[in-house]
Amino acid sequence: MPIFTQIILLGLMLTSFTGAYADNPHEPSTDVDRLVAVLVAKGTLTRDEAAEILGELDRVPIVDMSNSRSANSSQLATSEVPVRIKITGDLRLRAQTDDRTGLPEGAQVAEEAGEGRYLWRLGVDIPVQERWQVGFGLTSGGSDPRSNNQTFTDAFQTYDARIDYAYASYRFNDRVQLTGGKFDNPLWNAKDLLWDTDIRPEGAMVASRLLDNERLRLDLSTGGLILSDKESDISQDAYMWVAQLHARWQVNENWSLDLAPAYYFSQDLQGTPGLTDNAVPTNSRDANGNLLYDYDAATLSGAVTWQPPALVQQAQWFGELIHATDPSDDSIGWLAGTRFGAQRLDQLWAWQFSYNYRRLEQDAWPEFLQDSDFLFGATGVKGSEFELKIALGANTSIGLDYYVNNELLDTDIEQDLLQLDLNLSW
């Protein structure tokens, strides 16, 4: 059965399981509709005036410049009909220094490097019908899926813009949504041990809200991702299937707990020479240079959040764990860290500080997915990261990110990376 047929059938099965239903077309479906209906009932508007107002709203879309990315497969739409076109974006200016030691003789990487970079993204998300939404975005950078950075170089040359995401989303009801195309990562992750934050997966995902009350919320994300779709002598089609259950438990007004177990099943990664030239080839390979494993893996992300009555607005302890099920050795990865400060960087001088330590063994995870800033995105690494962010007002902040004493396991290679950022978003 073709992959997309399987995905669509999965979405329809989940829709039936969670109780999909058809809305009553005679009932008001948005807050605006309900408000107009009340005004008609009170005699403030006539039916003709109400019809004219609603007709004008249907013909003239509202452009929303609010700083929130569109609904994707992890953000279930509510029962209201979307009426706003959302335009979002951000710009980051970065200065960084990178010191490396222990590089092998003849390595094509400098021991010391200083760079100026920028990143920009612009996205548009549009409601098409009551249940359909589409979105697309542009970004700076090249073909590397783990980096939208553009380095200043080559005597003021002009640079390319790339497709960042392009998706279509269908909402079956308040609880089930299907998204296909290239989209924001729908999976909940406590940090970036498994997924670099710039990656936009491709394929189809179904997001289901299984439970939602004052204390507990359960979300299920399932689907298939396309890793490679090629026909040649040296490569083959490759896919990744994933299911994640994310539980958020509000223990009381000060404490909450997030737990998100997941399982990844990869198809036809084994035997390929690697899927991209942008990855550091650190996974195990056979004598012909082909990957030894498919990298099926069980993972767990979690966080405990405390909102104390004084001192800081929020303190959090988070972690990630991964175990690849097919390799017999070097198959474990873990990350543990803490974060404290303001809940949001929306006021002048609001701040957040975080620290994490990680260890990702050679064959715990595919070499092309994890944080690309942590020792070039290699597997078989360990080390620390410190982050400090300070708001300069709403939607504007500066950030300091320091990767220190990061090591490539079983070698003498180490890295210290310091990044200073100015971030603006809209």
Image: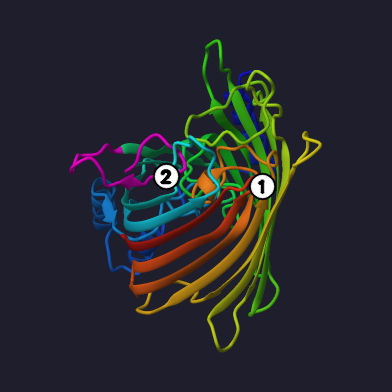
Q: Which residues are magenta?
A: 139-161
Q: Quadrant of the C terminus?
A: bottom left
Q: Position of residue 102 (x, y in %)?
A: 55, 47
**Which quadrant holds residue 329?**
top right
Residue 153 within the segment the image draws in magenta? yes
Residue toward you, 81 or 382: 382
Dot 2 lies on which element?
Answer: loop
Whole-percent x and y of residue 311? 55, 88
Mark with earlier residue (1, 2): 2
**Amino acid under label 1?**
Leu
Which mark, residue 110? 2
Image location (x, y in percent) of residue 30? 41, 56
* Amino acid identity at mark 2: Ala
Which structural element holds mark 1? loop
User: To which residue does mark 1 refer?
Assistant: 409
Residue at position x 66%, y 21% in the image:
271
